[in-house]
Every structure is written in C-alpha cells, then in structure tokens.
Image: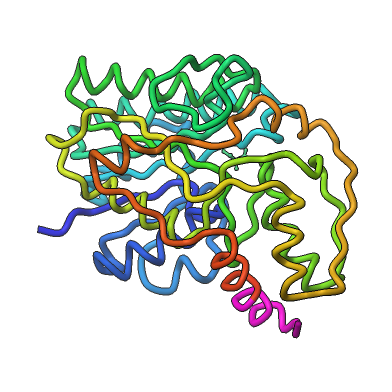
C-alpha cells in the first residue's frame, strides 16, 4: 500500500525538488507539500499544497489526521548563517519545530519521520578529515547545536517510544531549481549563477575552505533511499552522507573549463569561521554498509550538468 507523505519546508532548496520526485514515484495526491508561505506554482501542479506552521501543534495534528499521513519529512529549518544572525529564530524553528514533529509521530503513531541533520552538527574538536559517523560532536554554531539536539532527541524517541526516526547529516547541496537561503555552503550554488550571468563571482569563504558537498540528484536519492530502507537493517538512525569535497578555488577551476573567462575573487566574512568549524571530508561508510548508499556525481559531472540546466533556466549561453 502506498504511504502518504507530508513534507515541511517544501518550498526550500531541497523541499521543492524532493516533492516533485516523491510525487513522480508515489503519485501526486500521496505527497502533501506544506509550508508557511503561499506555494510556488511548481508545488501546486501535481498534488496538494497546504499552509502549515509546525509551531502550531493543533494545526499540525489536525493536518496529519485529515490528510491521513504515514510519513513526515521535516525539512523546515533555519540554516547556519541565518542561525548566527538570529539564534532565537533558529532555536524556535529547529528545536521546537523538531520536537513538535517527534511528539506528533509519538501521539499519532506515524510510520516514520525523517528530520535532516547536517555536517554542522560537528565542531572544531571533531577530526576534520574523513570524519567518522560516531565521533565527538561539539558544534559552535547555533544551527549545529540545534541539529545535535534533534539527532539525540530523535534517537531518544526511537528508543523510548518506538518512533521510527531517521536523519541524514547533509553536506552543502548544489542545485539548479531553487536557491538555498541562509547557509554557509550557499556560495557553491551562487557561483554558478554568477558565472553564467556575469562571468565573475566574489566568494564569502576563503579560496581553500574545503567542505563536503553533494549535487541535488544524489541528495534526492539518499533521502528517498533512507526513507525506503528496512528499519531492521539500520544500526544507526543518524547518518553521515557525502558525495565529494571541494574548495571554492576547485569549483572555480572546474567552471573555467567551460567558461574560460570566469573570474573569482575572495572577500571572506563571518561565514568563514562557521566553515572552519566543520569537517573537510566525511566518512559515510555506515550509510553505504547499512542501506547501500552510493553517490553518482563528482565535481566534474556536477559542474557540467549544473551549467547545462542553469543556462537553460536563465537563458544564458556559455
Ligand atoms: C548550511 O550551509 O548551513 C547548510 C548545511 C551544510 O547544513 N547548507
């Protein structure tokens, strides 16, 4: 029987493309896209979109019951850079929002909840190279603190109440459909827009700020693969996940292979300090071993595809 899935934060960078992919796989009507704002057209085309504020528990519970929801993918989150500007907002959205979702899963006996975590859950005292799945986690950003909390709370709900909680520690996600907002890894998307529009980009991180990254098709794949994994095969509930690691200079050099006149300059700001507290590369062997994770895109393949897709969308030749 097909499950009914509710996605929060569905007009965000990951949410928009995730809803489209889930609808293609499980049928438009079985995927309820939700968010606090009016829906973008793409989310109303092939299935329902509902206004939802996860901080309103009455509205949340009513929607789960009325829409007969089995699984929630809770993408609504304040990211690292916005979280440093407004830690109180990050706390409410990420901690209280996540708690409300876990409570709804417990009370209404949902089949599964997936709440993303991030590489931001690690901190300066975590080993930076090939960071293991199970390792010291003492993040120094508000966003990171909220993500560690949600991982621990979800694992507690699984053990104590039998809630099937799952979480992916996303790296920076690169995509051509919807811009990210408020993250430290956002430069890796902006650089493509600016390369196509203006042939130059000023980066807010240092040229050698190496971070783990992933292209959107792989992000959709790991999200859905984890959702579909048999709970009995999972030893973990929170998973490291990655596809590649690169610096701003690496991606600029790769873009230059396609757009030879492209130029990058550097004006690092407060986001550099956040980036420095995160891992440079990630060991995702737990995801590979427990549910068969394997990424498809490396830097070269991602750059080629990204430039093709974006140039079509922006009507910008290169
Ligand atoms: C951010 O930069 O805040 C996010 C993330 C790595 O979780 N993209």
Dividing the image into four equal quarters, which quarter contains ligand 1?
top right
User: For residue 100, what is the image quadrant?
Assistant: top left
Up-down: is 178 above or below 310? Answer: above
- Could you say which is closer to the camera, residue 2 or residue 278? 278
Placement of the N terminus among the 4 image quadrants: bottom left
Describe residue 228's horizontal placement relative to residue 21 as left or right.
left
- Which residue is at 39% across, 31% downward? 57
Describe residue 182's horizontal placement relative to residue 37 as left or right.
right
- Could you say which is closer to the camera, residue 316 or residue 149? 316
Q: Position of residue 241 (x, y in %)?
A: 43, 41
- Could you say which is closer to the camera, residue 119 or residue 57? 119
Whether 151 is among the magenta residues is no
Whether 315 is among the magenta residues is yes
User: For residue 168, what is the image quadrant?
Assistant: top left
- Which residue is at 37% across, 65% downward? 21
- Which residue is at 84% across, 68% downward? 262
Placement of the C terminus among the 4 image quadrants: bottom right
- Which residue is at 40% across, 27% downward? 133
User: For residue 274, what is the image quadrant?
Assistant: top right
Assign the magenta stretch its main secondary structure. helix
* Magenta region: 308-318
Describe residue 48's horizontal placement relative to residue 316 as left or right.
left
Q: Position of residue 6 (x, y in %)?
A: 33, 50
Q: Position of residue 230 (x, y in %)?
A: 15, 43
- The mark total stands at 0
Report the residue that reaches farthest toward the left: 1
């Amino acid at each position: 029987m097909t499950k009914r899935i509710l996605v929060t934060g569905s007009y965000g960078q990951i949410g928009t493309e995730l809803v489209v992919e889930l609808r293609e796989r499980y049928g438009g009507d079985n995927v309820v896209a939700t968010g606090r704002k009016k829906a973008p057209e793409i989310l109303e085309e092939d299935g329902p979109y509902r206004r939802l504020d996860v901080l309103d528990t009455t509205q949340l519970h009513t929607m789960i019951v009325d829409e007969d929801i089995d699984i929630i993918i809770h993408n609504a989150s304040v990211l690292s850079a916005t979280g440093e500007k407004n830690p109180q907002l990050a706390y409410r959205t990420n901690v209280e929002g996540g708690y409300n979702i876990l409570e709804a899963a417990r009370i209404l006996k949902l089949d599964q909840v997936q709440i993303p975590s991030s590489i931001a859950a690690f901190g300066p005292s975590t080993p930076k190279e090939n960071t293991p799945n199970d390792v010291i986690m003492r993040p120094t950003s508000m966003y990171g603190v909220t993500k560690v909390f949600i991982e621990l709370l979800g694992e507690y709900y699984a053990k104590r109440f039998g809630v099937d909680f799952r979480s992916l520690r996303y790296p920076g996600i690169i995509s051509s459909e919807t811009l990210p907002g408020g993250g430290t890894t956002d430069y890796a998307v902006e650089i493509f827009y600016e390369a196509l529009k203006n042939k130059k980009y000023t980066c807010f991180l240092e040229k050698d700020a190496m971070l783990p990254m992933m292209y959107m098709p792989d992000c959709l794949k790991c999200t859905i693969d984890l959702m579909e994994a048999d709970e009995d095969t999972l030893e973990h509930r929170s998973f490291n996940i990655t596809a590649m690691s690169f610096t701003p200079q690496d991606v600029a050099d790769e873009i230059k292979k396609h757009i030879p006149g492209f130029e990058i300059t550097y004006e690092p700001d407060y986001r550099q300090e956040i980036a420095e507290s995160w891992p440079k590369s990630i060991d995702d062997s737990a995801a590979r071993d427990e549910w068969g994770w394997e990424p498809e895109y490396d830097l070269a393949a991602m750059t080629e595809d990204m430039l093709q897709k974006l140039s079509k969308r922006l009507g910008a030749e290169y």
